[in-house]
Image: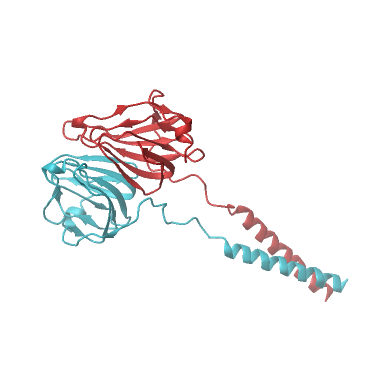
Chain colours: A cyan, B red
Amino acid sequence: MKNKAIAWASSALLVMLICVATIAQTPAKPMAEPDLIFPKGQRAPATNFTGTVWVQQLIEPDSAFNIPVGYVTFEPGARSHWHSHAGGQVLLAMGGIGYYQEKGKPIQILRKGDAVKCPPNVPHWHGASPTVEFRQVAIIPNTATGRVTWLQPVTDTEYNTL
Amino acid sequence: MKNKAIAWASSALLVMLICVATIAQTPAKPMAEPDLIFPKGQRAPATNFTGTVWVQQLIEPDSAFNIPVGYVTFEPGARSHWHSHAGGQVLLAMGGIGYYQEKGKPIQILRKGDAVKCPPNVPHWHGASPTVEFRQVAIIPNTATGRVTWLQPVTDTEYNTL
């Protein structure tokens, strides 16, 4: 009887070890990393942005196509300087939480799936929320009339008005 | 000694039950459903497509913007008819497996993250692979010169050449 109990305890120990090993291999929660579609690209020049911003050019304009298309990742707190486009701009929010503001209007929150038309020659900026990054596709149509005019940085006061 | 062994075996059994319950609560694998960014939209008209195609208009052109932007989901086997754009077209592959073909060239496979420039006035078609759906953003620049000219359907023979 004693031997049987010891044999049973040994088997139980083996099963426990297998259980523990299995649990150790199972991730505690789903991966936080989103299912990204485009590569993050290169660091954007600090001259036109506050904080860390990444740009992957998806379409370079050429003689047949006058629309540069880029994929931009703003790390938390990062944003563009104020700027305007002579031909306007289209933004497609791909993920995270974005801020978008046209001169004289309140900051607007952008979330995955939002599409924004920024009118020609209207000063505006876009970026991430303070704590969550923002990913966007940016399309600049009508570049025959000019691509972008950079203006002053977005101050912390302006950024924190929300 | 016997009682100790039984007590130990009982404890081991309890731990085993907890292990098994924990494993049972852990999902076997990550969810297969992709993390979709845009809504699927409405069924595309059967007059210009073969199979089931969904279109969500993201940007409607207006006096300031000459670029319609749409999100298109092709169910497996579905494809557009042959067509051309006077101002060309840009495709951004968002997920799944896509087919893209320009007249006189072989079918090209499109995968998540690919970006395609379809030149002005070149007949082409795009769609899903036979077994996996395809999701794309389609941008039509330069609509001042015309949006789309629809041509004949893509035959099964043409579709199955890959």
Residue at the right extreme, as displayed: A1
Residue under the image location 70 percent in, 62 percent down: B16
Closer to the camera in the image, A9 or B74: B74
Closer to the camera in the image, B31 or B1: B31
Residue under the image location 42 percent in, 30 percent down: B154
Q: Quadrant of the N terminus of chain A?
A: bottom right
Q: How many marks?
A: 0
Residue at the top extreme, as displayed: B47
Q: Within the image, what quadrant is residue B49 found in?
A: top left
Is residue B58 placed above or below A75 in the rendered structure? above
Closer to the camera in the image, A14 or B162: B162
Q: Is residue A100 rendered to the left or right of residue B130?
A: left
Q: Is residue A133 rendered to the left or right of residue A51?
A: right
Residue B127 in view of the camera: yes
Q: Position of residue A122 (x, y in %)?
A: 13, 43
Q: Position of residue A152 (x, y in %)?
A: 11, 55
Q: Position of residue A106 (x, y in %)?
A: 19, 44
Q: Within the image, what quadrant is residue A39 found in?
A: bottom left
Residue under the image location 84 percent in, 73 percent down: B2
Residue under the image location 41 percent in, 24 percent down: B46
Q: Position of residue A143 (x, y in %)?
A: 15, 44
Closer to the camera in the image, A83 or A64: A64
Residue B75 in view of the camera: no
